[in-house]
Image: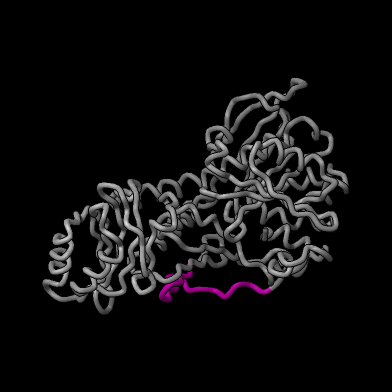
Amino acid sequence: MSRDMSDVTRAAHGRPVRQWRKNLTGVTTVFQTWWSRRPGHAPPTGDTGARRLPHEQQAGPSASSSAPASVPAASALWRMRTTVRDEPGSLAELCTALAGLRVDILSLQTHPLAEGTVDEFLLRAPGELMASELTRVVERAGGSDTWIERADAHDLVDAPTRVLGLAARTALDAAELPLVLRQLLGRCTIRQLPGTPVGGGRKPEGVPVEGVLEDTVMRLRAPEGGVITVERPYLPFTPTEFARARALVELDARLGPRVPHGEDVLTLPEGNEITVRRADPRDLEAAKEMHERCSARTLGMRYHGPVGDADRYLNHLLSPRFGRTLAVQTASGRVVGLGHLLWDGDETEVALLVEDKWQGRGIGGELLRRLVGMAVSAGCASVYAVTQASNTGMVAAMRGLGLPLDYQVEEGTLVITARLDVDAGVSEGALGFSNAEAP
């Protein structure tokens, strides 16, 4: 089983992910080289606004779809894109062909191009109609570069309502921007490089204010500097999609940094009250003060490298652009614990740090359950933690999730992966914010 590591974890180990995957031996603690070797942070690919379907019910580009299976249901929903000539009657010819197959057009969006028009359909078709037959008829009617895949009830929301809902999510929480872009654009990879790389290294190539659109890749200027890159295999972005994505990024930039203000007050077994809330860069000084109160062993367990370099990564860790962070504070307002959910390419890392005097009171387990709840909400298939075999607290917290676990261990480095299977009974409500007492 292979596993990536997030930027901060990768920084501590100081080697490219692909090499680390092949051999965990010889892990180093070189922090300075990590950024130039990073694959970049990205939200989980499952967060597309539609549920994942079995392979036999999916279809890709028409040129490579040899034998999609038929759907046994009485009717089936399909999303289809095809390019038609920009001539009077071309769309009517296509609609007539679909009607001949008893296919109902539920919605239609047009994306004008320099030559031709991309038409995006939501279709209800007879259940026995195969994707290959649907594609053949569309292309006989003048369609080209046809893409078709199964849809579900979530796709029945009309485009303006959908975009307004995504804008509302972005307005409430800066961490939602990469997830919202994925829901807007479908299956794609979204990566963000900060304008000032942590630990030095080469800055990302800048983009103009209006952004850059190149076929299946778009690059946008990130609100706080840096670059957001969106890539989608096979299916080129249209100018309309590019304009929508750019509008969401511009909205995010105008609103500035923000996180939800919700918090939970929990009672520990010995009677002390703690507050769990979302954290952001405004908690930087409080996090540094917690570092000063932590022992070298505790910091080493968390950062896997020289403890003197720990502070330099806090700006990155606390940024909502690269994941989500929870803070635990006492009744006096002192931060005594941090939990991070970090986007790592197509994977998601969880990491915990609890001040020495507050360890062994259930705080780590409480943070971890909430982070996993956020991962479920974001559509993650799994989360992983990179720690040391001697870190019995982290091992116990992962086991306490009650989820299927996989282990990799080599020379004291331990990677524990929790699979967020539906069959495991994981739900956002069970693992998210609640008013229940901490264990």
Does 372 appear above or below 214? above
Which residue corresponds to the image point at 73% horizontal and 47% vertical from the top-left?
285
Residue closest to the far top = 271
Judged left or right of residue 98, residue 278 is right
Judged left or right of residue 222, residue 310 is right
Report whether residue 111 is seen: no
Does 115 appear above or below 49? below
Taking the magenta stretch, the answer to whether it contains residue 216 is yes
Q: What x and y, as percent, mark residue 219?
A: 48, 70
Closer to the camera in the image, 356 or 88 = 88
Q: How many numbered markers are drawn?
A: 0
Q: What x and y, as percent, mark residue 178?
A: 50, 56
Picture quarter containing residue 353? top right
Taking the magenta stretch, the answer to whether it contains residue 234 is no
The image quadrant where one finds the C terminus is: top right
Picture quarter containing residue 62? bottom left
Q: What x and y, as percent, mark residue 255?
A: 47, 51
The image quadrant where one finds the N terminus is: bottom right
Closer to the camera in the image, 10 or 430 = 430
Does 88 appear above or below 155? below
Judged left or right of residue 297, residue 2 is left
Span shown in magenta: 202-220
Which residue corresponds to the image point at 71% horizontal and 58% vertical from the top-left?
8
Judged left or right of residue 81, residue 10 is right
Report whether residue 189 is seen: yes
The majority secondary structure of the magenta stretch comes to: loop
Closer to the camera in the image, 75 or 21 = 75
Q: What x and y, as percent, mark residue 138?
A: 22, 69
Residue closest to the far right = 296
Please, which colouring scheme is shown? Answer: one colour
